[in-house]
Amino acid sequence: MKSQRHGLVLDRTGAIFAELEALGLAGWEFQVVSTVEAARKALSRDPQLIGLVAFDSPHAWPAAELDQLLARPEVEWIALLEEGLLRSERISPELLRSFHDFHSLPLDRVRLAFTLGHAHGKAQLCRSAVGVRGEFGSYGMTGTSPKMRQLYRQIDKILTVDAPVLIGGESGTGKELVARAIHQHSARARGPFIAMNCGAIAPSLIQSELFGHERGAFTGAGQRKIGNIEAANDGVLFLDEIGDLPLEMQANLLRFLQDKTITRVGSTERVKVNVRVIAATHVDLQRAVAEGRFREDLYYRLNVLHVSLPALRERREDIPLLAETVFAEHRHQASPQVRGFGSAALRAMMDYEWPGNVRELINRVQRAMIMTENRLIGVSDLGLPTSAENGAQTLEELRSTVERELIEVSLKKHGNNVSETARQLGVSRVTLYRMIDRLKIIL
Ligand SMILES: Nc1ncnc2c1ncn2[C@@H]1O[C@H](COP(=O)(O)OP(=O)(O)OP(=O)(O)O)[C@@H](O)[C@H]1O
Ligand SMILES: [Mg+2]
């Protein structure tokens, strides 16, 4: 027997849901919710591949909330709506951008069964490209590569203790995102998260930014000011670019880490503060220590727990997923005709070095989505180098291009089934897997 497939129905009044149930579609089970918030909760609890949104009026749903819901990359959405609404200005842009398909009322059993089956098949394909159901990442981060999985496991452990953390990684790899995730998922979540960029504050002001000052402590200190350490009491203090902290301030920070008290500038009173310090750096702090620019004792105090974020080029397999996620999240700003990425664009993203890491990827994809005039985002929309720009093609490159295209077409034809594709192409499965790997084909 074929297993049941499930769909979530968002319907204000339940009337369209009743019509759907009356069709008695074999193999389908539907759950109904009446608010966008309830739909969001239902999907978090029990991930679904198919969502149906009923429109009984142009204002059926708050646009911003609905946009956010429709942005979930794992769900294929189908709109069910009164025929007249197809011409409504409020609804048609949504249809263009976010729905897999739409269906006007009254519901047609055969056509709806077909649409549902097609949408389900597509959602499953996307899911198999991503891996486990609904698993796109963890802690608000996107990525399922071994390097990211290792990172999630490290964070799991970091959450169980309360020691300082040092986060290393190139620019744009997600250091601040990780710091915020640690705060949000730890016992300190109810406390504040105070972020401070040590490189962006004039050295003369850092002391007072960190420790605060009393009124009249120095010229211009008209009011008492609570410093960032004190403001982060019971929460987390995130010290970004810790490598830029001037040496004398390093001594003061070390003193705070050792005795957990601060003294405001212009005061002698010692104030007890309960703060977890998370520091981040994009420079090699160990080298800074070796060169005498960073105190060794402070380095060891901060580096009790260490997280090192991988550069995007070290986890290239996450690039399509990240690009798709950015696409889904920013769909509301995109040119209305744009549907996704062309295969050359995906390949160019896989080949690129991404010096600016995830931040650069987000920027390039967002810009391409707004600026493109095509249905599929191309290499030039992303501003990435094409292989032609990298010089004339060698015979080897030409061979790879032909092989890649053949394999991709055949895989598509066989629904990504590697055994059947191998049979058609006359190679063994092992050989095909090797080629897929070598040619960086995305399954
Ligand atoms: N794994 C990820 N999944 C999704 N978004 C990510 C991921 N890593 C980073 N980002 C996003 O990329 C952008 C840059 O991340 P973040 O600011 O945390 O980087 P950073 O390492 O602190 O960079 P910098 O060193 O330049 O300050 C943010 O918009 C963040 O949300
Ligand atoms: Mg940062």
Image: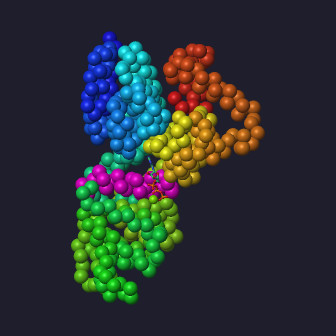
Q: Position of residue 242 (x, y in %)?
A: 43, 66
Residue placed furthest toward the front: 84
Q: Residue at x 57, y 29 (%)?
A: 436
Q: Is residue 140 visible?
A: yes
Q: Residue at x 54, y 41 (%)?
A: 335
Residue 168 drawn in magenta: yes
Q: Which residues are magenta?
A: 167-188
Residue 171 drawn in magenta: yes
Look at the picture and state if 285 lies above or below 111: below
Look at the picture and state if 293 lies above or below 115: below
Query: Would you say 36 lies left or right of 206 here?
Result: left
Q: Residue at x 29, y 41 (%)?
A: 37
Look at the picture and state if 285 lies above or below 220: above
In the foreground, 66 or 173: 66
Q: Position of residue 223 (x, y in %)?
A: 31, 82
Quarter the N terminus occupies: top left
Q: Is residue 345 visible?
A: no
In the foreground, 152 or 174: 174
Q: Residue at x 45, y 38 (%)?
A: 89
